[in-house]
């Protein structure tokens, strides 16, 4: 459901948290997400969250502060509690990670 909400035309800006822009895998993820948001005329804000909870929370708060309609988290070391924090404000989707949290979808 949340993944569908992020893809809807109602959203004007979505956020993407990646582990690190210097890692080619996450650069590829960001490029693919950018291509999809461009097709839908949705703005994309990308932040790097690093490996630790505190930096991920700061990055997610940056996205939330910009009023994003939803957040995608692409990090093999995502802090689930940081994602849960974001999910308390906007639709949140984990890319490549599973979560059994009721407010978070996984793709």
Image (spheres, rainbow, N blue to C red):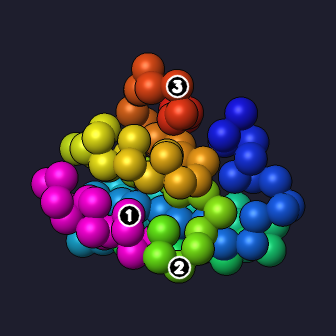
Q: Which residue is mark 3?
A: 102
Q: Which residue is mark 1?
A: 60
Q: Nearer the viewer, residue 9 or 101?
A: 101
Q: Quadrant of residue 27?
A: bottom left
Q: Nearer the viewer, residue 22 or 64?
A: 64
Residue 58: percent from left, percent from top: 27, 68
- In this image, 55 relative to 92: left or right? left
Residue 64: percent from left, percent from top: 48, 68
Q: Which residue is mark 2?
A: 66
Q: CA distance from mark 3 to mark 2?
A: 25 Å
Q: Is residue 39 above or below residue 79?
A: below
Magenta span of residues: 48-63
Q: Quadrant of residue 60?
A: bottom left
- SS assignment at label 1: helix
What residue lies at 46% left-to-right and 71% top-to-bottom?
63
- In this image, 47 relative to 37: left or right? left
Task: Look at the image and tell me whether residue 16 can be seen.
Answer: yes
Ranked by sequence position, the earlier of labels 1 and 3 is: 1
How many residues crowd mark 1 within 10 Å: few (<14), some (14–19), many (20+)?
Answer: many
How many residues crowd mark 2 within 10 Å: few (<14), some (14–19), many (20+)?
Answer: few
Ranked by sequence position, the earlier of labels 1 and 2 is: 1
What residue lies at 52% left-to-right and 25% top-to-bottom?
102
- SS assignment at label 2: loop
Q: CA distance from mark 1 to mark 2?
A: 10 Å
- Residue extending furthest toward the front: 88
């Amino acid at each position: 459901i949340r993944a569908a909400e992020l893809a809807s035309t109602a959203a004007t800006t979505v956020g993407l948290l990646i582990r690190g822009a210097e890692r080619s895998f996450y650069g590829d993820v960001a490029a693919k997400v950018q291509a999809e948001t461009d097709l839908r005329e949705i703005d994309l804000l990308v932040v790097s969250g690093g490996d630790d909870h505190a930096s991920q929370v700061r990055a997610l708060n940056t996205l939330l502060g910009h009023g994003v309609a939803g957040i995608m988290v692409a990090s093999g070391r995502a802090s689930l509690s940081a994602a849960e924090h974001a999910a308390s404000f906007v639709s949140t989707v984990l890319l490549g990670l599973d979560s059994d949290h009721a407010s978070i979808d996984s793709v």
